Image (tube, helix red, strand yellow):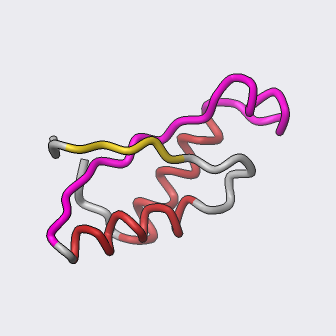
Amino acid sequence: MERFSMGIGDRFGREGRAQLAAFAAARGEGIEATPVWNKSHREHRLTGTAPIDVRREAEAAVAALGWTGS
């Protein structure tokens, strides 16, 4: 696992690819960091989502970008 991690996960579940692309761009600059997909219970209640929705967003972004990191 990389030395650094950063919590990501947008409120409405539509920016996963863009967020992961930022990690890929950082990797291209020699900065290795692990994205940690997360959304608070409060945000799930506000948006009517569930933890599985965050998982699906993360998996879709990883597949679309061919992410190979942690």
Q: Where 20 falls versus 48 (above or below)?
A: below
Q: Position of residue 41 (x, y in %)?
A: 69, 23
Residue at the (22%, 76%) spot, across then down: 28
In the foreground, 36 or 31: 31
Q: Position of residue 29 (x, y in %)?
A: 20, 75
Q: Which residues are magenta?
A: 30-51
Residue at the (64%, 50%) spot, across then down: 10
In the rendered view, does 2 fall on the left or right side of 17? left
In the rendered view, does 46 fall on the left or right side of 35? right
In the rendered view, does 8 fall on the left or right side of 11? left
Q: Where 61 falls versus 44 (above or below)?
A: below
Q: Where 10 falls versus 36 (above or below)?
A: below
Q: Where is the N terminus found, in terms of image quarters?
A: top left
- Number of dots carrying numbers: 0
Residue at the (70%, 31%) spot, across then down: 50
Magenta stretch containing residue 33, yes or no? Answer: yes
Q: Position of residue 16 (x, y in %)?
A: 55, 59
In the foreground, 23 or 51: 23
Q: Position of residue 5 (x, y in %)?
A: 30, 43
Residue at the (40%, 41%) spot, across then down: 36
**Where on the picture, by quarter, is residue 40?**
top right
In the rendered view, does 12 fall on the left or right side of 51? right
